[in-house]
Image (tube, grey):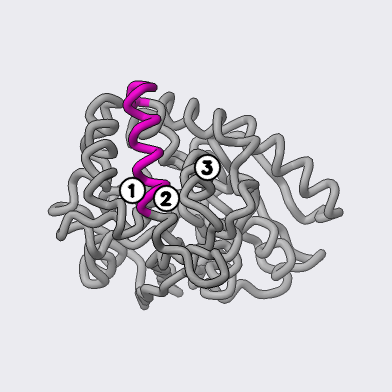
Amino acid sequence: MENTEEMYNLFNKAAKAYDQSGVEFFRPIGRRLVEFSGITAGASVLDIGSGRGAALFPAAVAVGEQGEVVGVDISEEMVKYAREDADELGLKQIELRVMNGQKPELEPGRFDAVIGSCSLFIWVKSADDVRPYLELLRAGGRFATAAPSFFSTVRGKWALFPDAVNELLMPYMLQSLKQSGAYDSQFANAGANWLVSAESIEKTLLEAGFVDVEVVEEELPVTVTSGEQWVEFTYTTGMRGMWERIEESERREVVAEVSRRLDALRDENGIITVPVPIVYMRADAPKA
């Protein structure tokens, strides 16, 4: 999504409800990313697209009072809410800035780690797009990011859509991307997408200048109590744009059908479990 104004507006709208839907999604991914990153006490960390703090706050705990975590986000609203939460938690090692994460204006070689939880995948398409993060790292520093898995997009399946509604929603997602001018995004361009396999990810990061690449796909069980709750959850994510581009009368019909299909998946306790594959990738800056 190279249309930064589109991205800015989308996440400003979603900021207040972002990660506040009662559905555990962004926070467990953020915690796992920090663990996967190997961030240690006293480190200097940059969180790209820090949002409401899913990875920001676990990173702050990991670095401790002697470290620092700089969070940047294009959305002023996201930064505002994250700053309020950081102040409430007393995490003085956090610094937040409104900044375009695609072109971070920060000192080269400043950070021990650069991370991005469910953010970088939105705009990164090639080694050239990753190279700016390498330049921000100290020698031997760690780059790590997490994204919904794209391994199945070559088969027309998007990880964030439950199997029961994938064929229903994918056409709307693709149409939304056409309307927004972002049809070259990761969703639509599966064949040339750098995230379609572990091998492609490794190749891209090596081309960017990183070394020691590791890629892991893990399944995150997302639980909701109704199909309606799952739809409400998607409104607090980047999928909000898809819903907003469907005509209101048609949207009501689609939401009703999505809810019906997902409600049929309830277990004996009334819980719907949607397994979402997440890809974690890390690589290091050369030591010399």
Question: Dot 1 lies on which element?
Answer: loop
**Considering the image in quadrants, where does the N terminus appear?**
top left
Q: CA distance from mark 3 to mark 1?
A: 27 Å
Residue 192 seen anywhere in this rendered image of the structure: yes
Asked if residue 285 is positioned above or below residue 48 in the image, the reply reads below
Q: Is residue 113 magenta?
A: no
- Which amino acid type is shown beneath numbered disc 1? Val
Q: Residues within 10 Å of mark 1 (few under 14, many from 20)?
A: some
Residue 42 position within the rendered picture, expressed as x and y whole percent measured from the top left: 72, 69
**Residue 72: quadrant of the picture:** top right
Q: Amino acid at mark 2?
A: Leu
The reply to whether discs 2 and 1 touch (Cβ–Cβ < 8 Å) is yes
Q: Crowding near pointer 2: few (<14 within 10 Å), some, many (20+)? A: some
Q: Which residue is mark 3?
A: 232
Tag 3, which secondary structure? Answer: helix
Of the two numbered discs 2 and 3 in the rendering, the one whose residue sits closer to the viewer: 3
Q: Is residue 210 above or below residue 1?
A: below
Q: Earlier in the sequence, mark 2 or mark 3?
A: 2
Where residue 13 sits, quadrant-wise, is: top right
- Is 160 placed above or below 112 here? above
Main SS, magenta region, reads helix
Give the residue displayed 49% in from the left and 36% down from the top. Answer: 100
Residue 252 is inside the magenta segment:
yes
Question: Residue at the location (61% across, 34% down)?
Answer: 98
Q: Residue at x 39, y 32 (%)?
A: 243
- Residues at badges 3 and 1 in contact (C-beta under 8 Å)? no
Instruction: Indicate which disc, 3 or 1, sits on the residue closer to the N terminus.
Output: 1
Residue beneath disc 1: 124
Which residue bears the numbered disc 2?
A: 120
Real-space Cα separation, disc 2 to disc 1, in angstroms:
6 Å
Binning the other alpha carbons within 10 Å of mark 3 as few (below 14), some (14 to 19) or many (20 upward) gives some
Bounds of the magenta span? 245-261
